[in-house]
Structure formats: structure tokens, C-alpha cells
Image (cartoon, coloured by chain):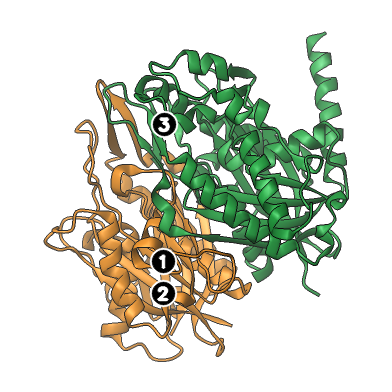
Amino acid sequence: MALNTVIESLGVYTPEGRLSTKELVDGCKVKPVLDLEELTGIKTRPIVADGEYAIDLAREAATRCFDISKYKPEDIDLVICTNISRYNGPNWKAGFEPSTAALLARDFDFSNAIIFDEPNACAGMFTALFIADAYLKAGFAKRAMIISGEALTCLARTAQKEMSAPFDPQMACLTVGDAGAAFILELTDKPNTGFHEMDVFTVAQHCDLCIGTYSKEPHGGFVMYTDSIKIHQIAIGMTAEHIGQMVKGTKWENSENHHYIMHQTGTRAIKTTRKSINDWVGKEVCSEKNSIVNVTERGNGASTAHFVALWDHIKNGTIKSKDNILFAVQSSGINLGVALYTLDDLPERVMNWNKIEQRDAVKEAM
Amino acid sequence: MGIKIDTIGLYPNKNKTVKTALELCRRAAEPCIKHSAYKKEDIGLVVSVSVYRDEYFCEPSFSSFVQNDLKINHDKIDSLGAKTLSLDVLNGSLGFLNACQLCAAMITAGKVKTGLIVSSDLVNGNVSEKGDAPGFLPSGAAMLIAGVQNGGSGFKTFHFKTYADMQAACESYMFHDVDHMTLIFKRDPAVEDIYLQAISKGVMEFLKKENAKLDDFDMIVPSQISSAFIAKMARTLGVKKEKMIDVTREGGDLFNASLPAAMDYIFKNKSPEPGQKALIINVASGIQVGCAVYEF
């Protein structure tokens, strides 16, 4: 019998700092013509502290992941880092070599693991999950760890300086938030648990709709240019079909049966995707009730978004052990992915860790 | 199932007329696909391993540009039928070997039939004079990897090792220098000796794990850094220089193109007999050592 891949542990770190959309928009030289908060639903997002970078977010998330896991770093034999952001030091330092995975090998004993970076825009962690599933099933690895630290609000800071039109290609930079996420995968022999289906592919003819690079302006920094309307139109339409093909005629047609975690770009985009999915399937499979939304407080965390959403909703009690989740991924590229997943007792273990963390924090404060 | 190299395409760019990473990829990948037994729609995976690419961009994946440029299932309007996943594997000059294993995993797990790996590291932007020269030759390389039912030949075991304590020996990064963003390369003057130290440890560990000895291999396929480096590596490992595949060129490291260039040379010039084995030994920033066995 084929074994399923299961998330053995999950760790998320979001920096304590918060940056509101109002503050961001107020700081723009040329303000967007649209009410960004109304359009995206994003009220605030986590922001790194001075001197805190992408690698720090990744390290913190991995540390939490190991706290919850039964494994130690030396037990991991595949490490894939998927952060788009390589913003790792003062003066807009962005590392090319060594890879993020190799940098983390200074903090964790990954000396015997297969390690590499696999950034794939906002689909990075999901693509790495797809790859890791292959390594596990092919017998090339027993335990895989996927890590991402996204320090992205630097894009918003550059956009504040550079946006020159009320509907500017850098406007999407004002939606991002900072976060780190990490999870460990292994095979399970429990047939009702883990990933039942997963698929991801690239519609490359639209690869130029969102480009992230460095600023050519004297102030430096990083920029992202997005054709938001076109990328959303294509990604939402194709996601509806992709999900529809996977769930139609299956138990996943029952909207009470599972949660939907879609890419967290904005509340309106999630609502439109929901409607498109239901239109395609011909019934309400994705409802307001079963859609996970955390973009209002987290912003778009790029590759970390799905796993920060999972973490947040485990912690607030919405997602519980044994629950079913449909992950839907859209990113520049354009990458589209869907996965059907049944949780084991991970939510209980995350909650137990959370209680210990809170107790330790109280002790420290006393 | 065996995982074999189906075809290799190279574009050495000796006169440096090609100025973009995307075009280097195209010039290497087109003949690679053309001479293959597979059609474009059979390619389920496109992996770019180029660390240094046009505009130094970080989103989307460079491979999605390559997929689009080569028109490999690029214009899908739904999720049905043949499709392709594009992704980048970034890991210094070890990316190509990582990508070979990745393709092997994806094929073995039944997720794809074939995978196309491309590399075209090229610096066409600002480089800081405060650091070292990039040190590698901009060239294009492509390799199509496929599963074969015979199971006897192709990639065998892979082994990777990271020596994080040696990591300071080489790094590269972008930074803001007064009024512009620039790329800087920093290498310890003794970086080659540090590489050799890591190789020595990594290879010994690999041989012990596999219960093998260097005499078991007919050829050694090293990173194509320079002829002098390869000669030193032969001395460090205690193997005859003739056993080392040296396709280096004057003026720089072949970087991620090392493995496809060396394997292409073997297929075209060494007429390997069935059962002969090559030991691939790659070294990269990190410091990382990758070993793999390829059986012909």
C-alpha cells in the first residue's frame, strides 16, 4: 500500500513589530488611487525589527519546528529552503552564495543532509512539499524539512519611495508581510492521514506578470513589479478549474468536511476565488465558513502564507486534529497547485507547545 | 528503474557573444531536446540551477522563463493533459548535481517522465571592484534526464556533505554601495585548498559508507574549476591524473556547467563500456561536497 506524506511538525515565527496599511499608504510619495485596506482587507502585517532579516525568521521558525518535533536536526536528511527574500544584512545585503540552506547549517546540524534552496515565488514551500513527497516516496530521504524566512516589507519601503502613479505596478508591494515558517515531513502508514492528492504545475507563458529584483534607483533596495489585475484573473480562473477537477464527485464536495487554505493575497481575491470554485463545481464547496483567512492581520507572507495560516488557525482553535484541509496555491510563474490533506494530531501538539511557551514566558516575566 | 542521462546540450559561448542567461539556456537546451527520444510535452519538470541570472531577479523562478522560452507546455489553459512544473534549485555550483537527484526522485516516485536541467550562470550587471572577479565562465548547459526500465545503468547513489565550519571561504551577495546596488564576490585566497580539504573528508566518508574504494571507479568527474585544481585533487585523493576528466577552459571555472560538460565529454570521447563507473565529485560554497556514481 502506498504511504502518505504527513506534516510531522510545524513551526511559525512572526516578528512582534506591526505595520498598518494606513501607515504604509501615508508614507507613499504618490498614494494609490484605490483604498488599499478596503481592496485587500489587510489592516496590518508583521514587520521585522531593525537588524532582523530573512535568515533570522527562517532560523526562529525552524527552532520552533524542532521544539514541536520528535526529531533533532541530525535526523533530517533533506532540507529545502524556499524564501524569495535573501535580504540578510545591512545596506540591503542579499546573499547569493552560500545558499540559505547552507547558512542554516551553521545553526542546525544538517551536515549529513541533502540541502538546497528552491525559491519558487509564493509557491516555494508548496513546490518543496511536492518535491519532498517525491524524495520520501522514492526512498531518497526519510525525513524532509522545508524552511522559509520571508523578510518582504523592505519591498513596501522601496515602493513608498518609487511609486509614481496612482495605479502603480509596485502597489502589490504594499500588501506583503514578514514571517518565517518551517515544517517536517515523513511518511505515515495511516491511510486516512496525510496528503491524499497533490498537484502543481507552471503556466509559464505568464511568467512576466510579476518580477522581483533590485532597485536601480540611487536609494537601492528591492522591488517587485506586478500586473495585479491580469495575474489574478488568470490564477483565479485556473485555480477554480484545478480545484474543481480534483474535488468534483469526491467527498471533498461536502463543504462541511474541510477547510480551504488559499494563497493569502487579499480578502477580495479570496472571495472571488471562492465564487469561481463554486461556479465551476456547480455547488457551494468553498464557503465563507470553511475558508481560512488571516491576510487581514498577516499581509501576504509569500511562500510562508499557507503555513502561517495553518498555524494561526490551529492556535485559535479553528483547525483541529483529524480535520481535512484543501490547500490551493497560486504564485507568479504562474504556478498553480492543489493538495488534499488530513491532519493527524499535529494541532494538539502545537497547542501543547503553545501552553508550555506561554507558561515559560510568564515565569520569565515574574 | 534506472535514471539515465538521455541527452546533453552545451553552448560554451567561447567568444562571449551571448549576453543573457536566458539565451544561453536556449542555445544549450534546444539541441538537447532535439536529439532526445522525448518530445517537449513529455518534459514534466524544468529545473534551472543558475545562481547568477539576468537582472539578478529573484521572482518568479528563472526556470519559468526558460519553460516559456522553449515553449514546453507553457500555454496551458486548464490542469488536464501534459503539464510541466518549473522550479529553481539554487546551491552554488552544486545545484546541477542536486537537480540530477531531484529529477531522479521525481521520476522514481512517478511524478514525471523526464526532467530538463539547465544552467547558464552569467553576470551581466554591476560587480563591485571591492571584491573578487566572478571567476566563472558564462556558458549554457542542459541535460535531459529520464527513467529507463532496464535498471542497470544511470545514476546510482548520491551523497552530500556540508562543512559549515569552512563556510567563510567564499560568499557572494548584493549590497547598496553609496548610490547603487552591486554584486560582490569574496573568496579566501586559499579557497581551493579549503575545497580540497572538504573533498578529502567528503569522499572518504562516501567510500566508507558505500564500502567502496577509488579503484572501483573508471573515471573521476570533478568540478571543472581549473586544470591545476584537478591535478591537485588527483594528488589529494591519490588517484592517477589520467583518471580525472578535465574539460576545463582557460579563464575560469565552469561552475554549474561542470557536470554536463564533463559527462558530455565522456559520452563523446571515452566510449564508456557498459558497467564502467564514473565517480562524480562536486564542491561548492557552503562548503559542500556532493558525490554520485554514474554507471554506463
Query: Type of residue at label 3?
Result: Gln
Residue in front for this viewpoint, A76 or A274: A274
Spatial CA span between label 3 and label 1: 32 Å
The chain holding disc 2 is B
- Mark number, residue B117: 1
- Mark number, residue B144: 2
Query: Type of residue at label 1?
Result: Ile
Quarter holding the C terminus of chain A is: top right
Q: Is residue A128 visible?
A: no
Spatial CA span between label 1 and label 2: 6 Å
The chain holding disc 1 is B
Give the colour in which the image draws chain B: orange
Query: Type of residue at label 2?
Result: Leu
* Relative image position of residue B4 (x, y in whole percent): 47, 80
Q: Are marks 1 and 2 in contact (CB under 8 Å)?
A: yes
Residue in front for this viewpoint, B190 or A180: A180
Residue in front for this viewpoint, B69 or B291: B69
Q: Count residues near mark 2 (Cα–Cα under 10 Å), then give few for <14, some for 14-19, many for 20+.
A: many
What is the secondary structure assignment of the residue under circle 1? strand
* Relative image position of residue B37 (x, y in whole percent): 41, 86
Q: Are marks 3 and 1 in contact (CB under 8 Å)?
A: no
Spatial CA span between label 2 and label 3: 37 Å
Q: Chain in green?
A: A
